[in-house]
Amino acid sequence: QVQLVESGGALVQTGGSLRLSCAASGIISSIYSMYTMGWYRQAPGKQRELVATITTGGTTNYADSVKGRFTISRDNAKKTVYLQMNSLKPEDTADYYCNANLASRNGWGQGTQVTVSS
């Protein structure tokens, strides 16, 4: 079972940038590379929502609310997925979660908190 640990969350001002990382363990790199990796977020009182995903082939998908501001990338050798967040807005404030998905295998990290002050 894949284990995921997120890092990089912080308090940042509107317009600022952050880079989140999610490191995987419990699987070898060749298996990790087969997973579709994703970032989700959950704001207080709201449901968890998709932010971005990246497939094994590098195809990316973004929520409309973050297109043009966020970039997801992965380093299979390091078994790490990243989320570069630019031009942050107060509405980006949430707990951000990493997800790994491969067929019936699905894993979540514990989350990292991002707070954007106005």
Image (cartoon, rainbow, N blue to C red):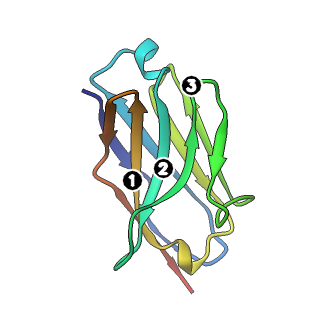
Query: Is 61 placed left or right of 110 in the picture?
Result: right
Mark 1 and mark 3: Cα distance apart in space: 19 Å
Does residue 39 lie above or below 96 as drawn?
A: above
Mark closest to the chain's N terminus, 1 or 2: 2
The amino acid at mark 3 is Thr
Q: Quadrant of residue 96?
A: bottom left
Label 1 or label 3, whichever lies nearer to me, is 3
Instruction: Find disc 3 in the rendering and name its residue.
Output: 56
The mark found on residue 39 in the picture is 2
Specify whether residue 100 is in view.
Answer: yes
**Quadrant, the N terminus:** top left
Residue at point 48% right, 20% down? Answer: 34
Nearer the observer, 28 or 106? 106
Q: Residues within 10 Å of mark 3 (few under 14, many from 20)?
A: some
The kind of residue tagged 1 is: Tyr
The image position of residue 114, as x and y in percent, is: 44, 67
Tell me if residue 53 comes above or below residue 93 in the rendering: above
Contact check, label 1 and label 2, Cβ < 8 Å? yes
Alpha-carbon span between mark 3 and mark 2? 15 Å
The residue type indicated by label 2 comes to: Trp
Side of 29 relative to 62 (left or right): left
Badge 1 is on which residue? Answer: 97
Q: Residue at x 70, y 60 (%)?
A: 69
SS at badge 2: strand
Secondary structure at badge 1 equals: strand
The answer to whether one can see residue 114 in this image is no
